[in-house]
Image (cartoon, grey):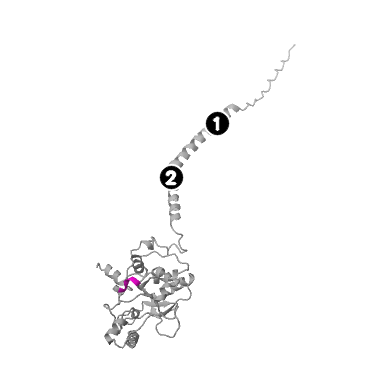
């Protein structure tokens, strides 16, 4: 009897086993990567602080330091800005601008002119002829308005005087005004002869020459008067010019501050022997701030100052 072959049992099915993730290995690799990243970051940081940052911070520090010292520039385009500015205080011959109560910036160029144009000496030894007439005479702002035609000065002197009166008023002295400024040769001749006649009337025994010698102590001969220059003026708060003005507070203020505006007290009390003119606390002469300050601080009169500049 034929036996049928037994069927072979089928091979059991193989199941694939999933491998469990190796957490330890993953963490180890992550740790290594983190360490490497930290090392790289440290290297980059060192390079930055050692080489890059010093150059940048140095430039910024210099800028900020410079900015803290320099004044804030005026608003202007970069194209208009100068490449280099020199403080005016460093310019030879410049006298620093004083502190005023008033805003006098618009007058600064008049109070402090350049050069020696206004350092003109006029006296009995240095004279002007009859044809000398300044071509820039300007009406004055602070005059007595008494109808006399002697209320003009040269432009720079007139503007500097205007500034001085603005500050004078700001300081509380409101009753001072200009009584006489520019005088033509002919008008000075008229005054000198009038005063000489008055001297002879007071003392009939005087000769004309003697009377003129007396007159010269308080009034200049024609051609020797500073008034013809258009650079001086008489100012006070009295009915007429008098040495009593010297005791007024306004006169003291003018004497102590006129140089800041470019003026000097032309005929000081202690310089009569040098100037040849008696004390006139009302007579102020424009020379510009540089020269006026030098004269004031040294206690000189104009004759002494000019002689000193010449090396005498």
Which segment is the magenta one?
A: 268-272
Decide which of 138, 299 is in the foreground and name it.
Answer: 299
Residue at the far right: name it.
Answer: 1
Specify the quadrant of the image occupied by residue 254. bottom left
For the N terminus, the quadrant is top right
Mark 1 lies on a secondary structure that is: helix
Q: Position of residue 277 (x, y in %)?
A: 32, 76
Specify the quadrant of the image occupied by residue 305. bottom left
For the C terminus, the quadrant is bottom left
Residue 84 included in the magenta stretch of the image: no
Q: Where is residue 114 in the image (x, y as percent from the top left)?
A: 35, 69
- Nearer the observer: mark 2 or 1; the answer is 2
Q: Can residue 296 be seen in this view?
A: yes
- What residue is pinned by disc 2? 54
- What residue is pinned by disc 1? 31
- Left or right for 32, reference 118: right
Q: Earlier in the sequence, mark 2 or mark 1?
A: 1
Q: Can residue 163 be seen in this view?
A: no
Q: Is residue 294 placed above or below 131 in the rendered structure?
A: above
Residue at the far top: name it.
Answer: 1
Q: Position of residue 3 (x, y in %)?
A: 73, 13
Please name the predominant secondary structure of the magenta segment in the image. Answer: helix
- Left or right for 126, reference 112: left
Which residue is rendered at x = 48% and y = 37% of the image? Answer: 42
Tell me the distance, in whole angstroms, between the alpha carbons under discs 2 and 1. 34 Å
- Left or right for 272, reference 109: left
Decide which of 138, 177 is in the foreground and name it.
Answer: 177
Decide which of 293, 157 is in the foreground and name it.
Answer: 293
Mark 2 lies on a secondary structure that is: helix
Which residue is rendered at x = 43% and y = 48% of the image? Answer: 58
């Amino acid at each position: 009897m034929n036996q049928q072959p037994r069927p072979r049992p089928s091979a059991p099915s193989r199941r694939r086993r999933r491998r469990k993730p190796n957490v330890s290995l993953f963490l180890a690799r992550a740790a290594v990567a983190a360490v490497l990243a930290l090392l790289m970051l440290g290297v980059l940081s060192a390079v930055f602080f050692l080489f890059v940052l010093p150059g940048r911070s140095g430039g910024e520090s210099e800028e900020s330091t410079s900015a803290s010292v320099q004044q804030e520039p005026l608003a202007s385009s970069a194209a208009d800005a100068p490449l280099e500015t020199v403080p005016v205080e460093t310019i030879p011959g410049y006298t620093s601008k004083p502190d005023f109560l008033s805003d006098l910036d618009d007058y600064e160029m008049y109070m402090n002119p350049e050069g020696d144009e206004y350092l003109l000496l006029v006296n009995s030894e240095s004279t002007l002829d009859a044809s000398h007439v300044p071509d820039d005479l300007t009406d004055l702002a602070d005059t007595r308005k008494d109808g006399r035609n002697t209320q003009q000065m040269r432009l720079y002197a007139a503007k500097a005087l205007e500034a001085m009166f603005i500050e004078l008023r700001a300081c509380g002295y409101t009753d001072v005004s200009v009584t006489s400024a520019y005088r033509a040769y002919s008008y000075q001749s008229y005054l000198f002869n009038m005063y000489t006649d008055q001297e002879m009337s007071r003392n009939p025994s005087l000769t004309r020459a003697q009377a003129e010698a007396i007159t010269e102590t308080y009034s200049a001969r024609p051609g020797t008067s500073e008034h013809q220059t258009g650079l001086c003026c008489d100012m006070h708060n009295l009915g007429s010019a008098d040495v009593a003005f010297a005791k007024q507070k306004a006169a003291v203020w003018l004497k102590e501050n006129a140089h800041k505006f470019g003026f000097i007290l032309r005929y000081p009390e202690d310089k009569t022997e040098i100037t040849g003119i008696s004390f006139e606390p009302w007579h102020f002469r424009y020379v510009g701030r540089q020269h006026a300050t030098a004269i004031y601080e040294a206690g000189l009169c104009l004759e002494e100052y000019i002689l000193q500049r010449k090396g005498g």
